[in-house]
Amino acid sequence: MREQRGWELRGEIGQVWRLSLPAILTQITTIAMQYIDSAMVGTLGANASAAIGLVASTTWLFGGITYAISAGFSVQVAHHIGGKKEREARQVVCHGLLVALLVSGLLCLIGLSISGKLPVWLGGNPEIRKDASAYFMVYALMVPFSQINSLNSSFLQCSGDMVTPSILNAVMCVLDVIFNALLIPRFGVMGAGMGTALACACISLTMTARCCIHNEKLHLRRAEGVHFDPEILKKAFRIGTPVAVQEIAMNSAMVAATMIIAPLGAVSIAANSFAVTAESLCYMPGYGIGSAATTLVGRSVGAGEAKQAKRYGNICTAMGVCFMAATGAVMMLICPLVFRMLTPDSSVRSLAAQVLRIELLAEPLFGASIVAAGALRGAGDTFVPSLMNLGSIWIVRLGLAMILVRRLGLHGMWIAMAVELCVRGCLMLYRQRTSKYYNLYKKETVAENA
C-alpha cells in the first residue's frame, strides 16, 4: 500500500511539473521583458529609471483588475472542462471576451485621463514627472491588448494547453527587445513603453486566434452562437470580485508605499524599482506552479474529485515553497551582478542589493502564499483569501513601513515587506488546510442533477 501511494505521488508530482514547466517558462519571458526594459532604460540614468518606478505601482493596480477578470472566467472554463462540458466552456469564453473588452476599454480611458496628473499625485520630483506621465499614457493604451492576452492565455492553460502561451510570450519578449532597440534611442522612456505595447498588441491578437480558432476544446463554433447566460456572469462576479477587490486594495497599498518612498529621492525610487524587478525572477516559479495549481485543482473539482483536488493543492504548494527557497538563495548570491546589468549607477546598485537581500529571506513563505492562492482560486475560494491578503498588506506592511521608513529609509520599507510576506504565507497555508470549497462544486453539481 505504501509503495502504491509512493507511485501515485510520483505520478502527481510529474503531472504538476508537466503543467508547471511551460507556465514557469511563460513567467521567465514576462520577467525577461521587465529586465530588458529596466536595463535599456537604466542606460539613460537614474532619473529615467525613477520615472518608470514612480508609476509602476499604478500599472500593477490596472494589471490587477485585468487579472481578476481573467480569474473570474478561466476558473469556470477549468471546471467545465474537468466535467467534460466543453460547449459550456466555450460559452464562458465568449462571455469572458466581451466583458474583458468592456472593462479594459474603460480602464484605458481612465488611464489616459489621469496620466498627466498621476506623477504629481504620487509626489514625484519635477524632473521625472514628464517621462513618468508619457510612459503611463502609453501603458494605458496597451491595457486592452494586455487584458485580451491574459484572458486567452488563462483559457488555454485551463484547457490543458500550457505550451502555446509559453511560446507566444517568448516571442513577445523577442519583439520587445527589437521594438525597444528601435524606439528608446528616439523617444527615451516613452519608447520603452511603446516597445512593450507594440509587442503585447502583436501577441494578444495571435493568442486570441490560438484560443478561439485553433484550440480543439475552446474554438468557437458558428453553429453554437452566443447565448447570454446571466449565471456565467454571476459566477464570474462571485469568483472575480474578491480577486478584483484584493488586487485593487493590494496595488493601492503599493501606490501608498510609492508615496512613502517618493520623498527619499530619485536614487531610492530607482533602487526600489530595480530591486522589485530583480526579485521578480525569484517568484517566477511560484506563479508558474500557481497557474498549474489553478488548472489541476479546477479540473479535479469540476470532475467531482474533491480529495484529489486538495491533494494537488498541497503538492503544488510544497513545490512552490521549495522552488522559491532555491531561487531566493541563488539571487542572494548573484544580485550584485544582476544590478550591474540593469544600471550603471553605483549608488543605485548598492542600495538595491542591500534592500533586496532583506526581502529574500521571506521567499519560501512568499511561495506558499502564491501557490496556495492559485490552488484556492481553482476551487473557487477567493473571498476569504482576499480578505487575508488585504489585512496582511494594509495592516502589517504599510503599518510597519510608516514606522520604519522614517528611521531606516528604503531599508525600512523592505523590512516591512519581508515581515508581511511571512505573515501572508502563514495565512494562506492555514486557509489551504481548512478551506471547504474543495467539496462545494461537487455539492452544487449533485443539487443541479437532483
Image (cartoon, grey):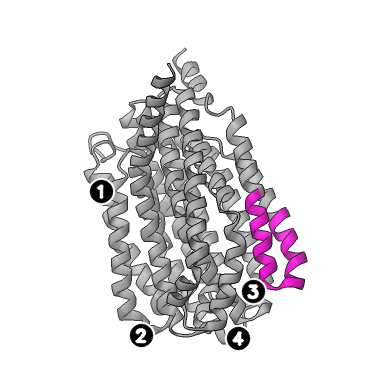
Q: Position of residue 448 (x, y in %)?
A: 47, 18
Numbered label attached to residue 185: 2
Amino acid type shown at disc 1: Arg
Residue at screen point 51% across, 39% down: 318
Choose mark 1 or mark 2, whichever is in front: 2
Secondary structure under tag 1 reads helix
Whether residue 54 sits left or right of residue 16 in the image: it is right
Is 337 placed above or below 152 here? below
Give the answer, above or below, for where 69 lies relative to 31: above
Q: Please identify, in this view, whether the residue under mark 4 or under mark 2 is nearer the observer.
A: 2
Residue under pointer 4? 126
Ranked by sequence position, the earlier of labels 1 and 3 is 3
* Secondary element at image label 3: helix
> Which residues fall within the magenta stretch?
395-422
Distance between mark 3 and mark 4 Cα atoms:
12 Å
Query: CB atoms at circles 4 and 2 under 8 Å apart?
Result: no
- Using a 10 Å C-alpha cutoff, classify the residue at mark 4 as few (fewer than 14 neighbours), some (14 to 19) or many (20 or more): few
Q: Which residue is mark 3?
A: 121
Q: Earlier in the sequence, mark 1 or mark 2?
A: 2
Q: Residues within 10 Å of mark 2 (few under 14, many from 20)?
A: some
Q: Nearer the viewer, residue 205 or 254?
A: 254
Q: Secondary structure at mark 4?
A: helix
What amino acid is found at the position of numbered circle 3 in the picture?
Trp
Q: Which residue is mark 1?
A: 210
Amino acid on which disc 2 is placed: Pro
Residue 432, image x and y in percent? Answer: 58, 35
